[in-house]
Amino acid sequence: MAFIDYYKVLGIDSKASADDIKKAYRKLARKYHPDINPGDKEAERKFKEINEANEVLSHKENRAKYDKYGENWKHGEEYQKAQQQYRGQAGGQQGAYGGFSSEDFADGADFSDFFQSMFGGGGGFGGRTRGSASGKFKGQDVEATLNLPLREAAKTHQQTFEINGKKVRITIPAGIADGQKIKVKGHGNPGHNGGPNGDLFITFNIEEDSHFKRKGDNLSAQLHIDLYTAILGGEVHVQTLNGNVNLKVKPGIQNGTTVRLKGKGFPVYKKDGEFGDLLVTYHVDLPKNLSEEEKELFLKLKNLAK
């Protein structure tokens, strides 16, 4: 394990006071905190070093050992006993290290055993930071996805679901969009050292509907009519989000014609009483399996049209 100069890590000198150590730690911890640098491995490594340095230097006894033994501070007393024993056996003829090197006490890890115990073996932050002796930090935010049928998204309603073992109840405003994200404050992971909880961010996935297609605040739908209604005109029932309405069909309507029903579309998000439009496209169904009599009548119509 390479020697880490904890004073250098915190940007202070060996004569720094306890207050100086605290101030330096808080400043750097904020800068390299995982919540501020999501996915940044280098920032995560620095944050671990900063916490390790603080854990040692903010603890009076540990700092004294570090100042006395340097990189071997964790094994200082053990090292000193071994040195004395070796000197006794060798008549004090060995050098200042008594025949031992720093490798004899190295643990081979990326960080010290002390730091490993504080941070659970370096296996990632798991949603929040652990082990800091001082400094309050906001907990990590939590991301969640909520699937919602189109017709439910069209009305304001409440939903209850579970995040991290806790039930969360939210009110979903009518008109929520596919992919839209809302924040629920304080429902993320717990804060560190008394800091505030993180927030919950919910992304909505609006499921497709079998009848309506949505584009913004407008809806579109296909309306099948028979040939006779298309030619002669008439009245048909049109399905909307709020029930059926009657629609008059003009005689001679063409297949693929689209009509707009104002205010019959999707509710506008957080604007009570405002709605988009419903676009209805006619699909003319041609008759099948005609009888001989029906064929003769269509033939007469064809001849009359010449």
Image (spheres, rainbow, N blue to C red):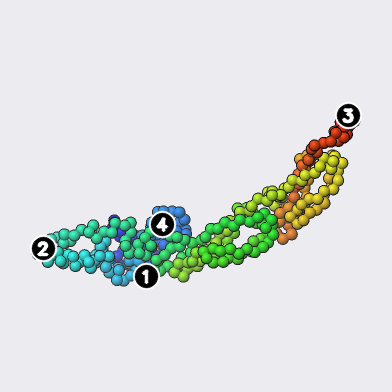
Q: Please give the residue where the numbered disc 1 appears in the rendered image.
A: 19
Q: Amino acid at mark 3?
A: Asn
| C-alpha separation, residue under disc 2 versus residue under disc 4 | 46 Å
| C-alpha separation, residue under disc 1 versus residue under disc 4 | 25 Å
Q: Please give the residue where the numbered disc 4 appears in the rendered image.
A: 44
Tell which tag, 1 or 3, sits nearer the viewer: 3
Q: Can you tell which mark lies on residue 303?
A: 3
The answer to whether one can see residue 168 in this image is: yes
Q: Amino acid at mark 2?
A: Ala
Q: Amino acid at mark 4?
A: Glu
Dot 1 or dot 4: first in sequence order is: 1
| C-alpha separation, residue under disc 1 versus residue under disc 3 | 103 Å
Q: Please give the residue where the numbered disc 2 appears in the rendered image.
A: 90
CA neighbours of label 1 inside 10 A, class few (<14), some (14 to 19), many (20+): few
Dot 4 or dot 3: first in sequence order is: 4
Tell which tag, 2 or 4, sits nearer the viewer: 2
Dot 2 or dot 3: first in sequence order is: 2
Tell which tag, 4 or 3, sits nearer the viewer: 3
